[in-house]
Amino acid sequence: MTDNLFARAKPKLNPPVSAWKADMPENSEPQLVPPQLLWMNKINNVYLEIPRYDKGMTWWGMFPLALVVVLFFRVYVNYVCFDAAIRRWLRNTLLGNIERCGFIDIGIFLFENCIRYTSRSANSSELQTTKYLCL
């Protein structure tokens, strides 16, 4: 039966595209090719195809990667960007205590990133640079 339906269908493009089987019908034309629905729902008498195809890719690998990235930046900010006085101050404050509990580590990370700090030159007592680490 489907061969007869394909025989009646004529391409709208001349020459037709490779692997052409049938064009979509106009609103007033009957559908010549039967639907080949793999995942379908029936809404009254109309069949609706819902694409549910999966490429097999999941995002579970992003959670460990995010943890590694946050820990890397945490160590970088604590031990490379901040001098010992600021690290000691952060450890001794309430924020340091909350950080040790591990509840808002990302909030502490952003707080420390936005702290303005000043580094002093080793040879002189004058201010060398003022740096901002806000993201």
Image (spheres, rainbow, N blue to C red):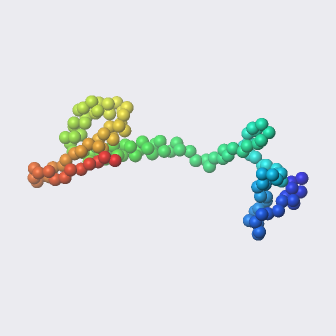
What residue occupies the far front of the structure in this picture?
Answer: 28
Q: Nearer the viewer, residue 49 or 25?
A: 25
Q: Is residue 42 left or right of residue 127?
A: right
In the image, residue 33 above or below residue 96: below
What residue occupies the far bottom of the structure in this picture?
Answer: 15
Q: Position of residue 27 (x, y in %)?
A: 78, 51
What residue occupies the far left of the structure in this picture?
Answer: 124
Residue 4: image quadrant is bottom right
Residue pictured at 75% horizontal, 38% vertical: 43
Tell me if I can see residue 55 in this picture: yes
Q: Is residue 30 left or right of residue 79?
A: right
Q: Is residue 85 left or right of residue 58?
A: left
Q: Is residue 24 left or right of residue 97?
A: right
Residue pictured at 76% horizontal, 42% vertical: 47
Q: Position of residue 69 (x, y in %)?
A: 40, 46
Tell me if I can see residue 3 in this picture: no
Q: Nearer the viewer, residue 80 or 106?
A: 106
Total numbered labels: 0
Q: Nearer the viewer, residue 84 or 14?
A: 14
Q: Position of residue 107 (x, y in %)?
A: 35, 37
Q: Position of residue 129 (x, y in %)?
A: 19, 52
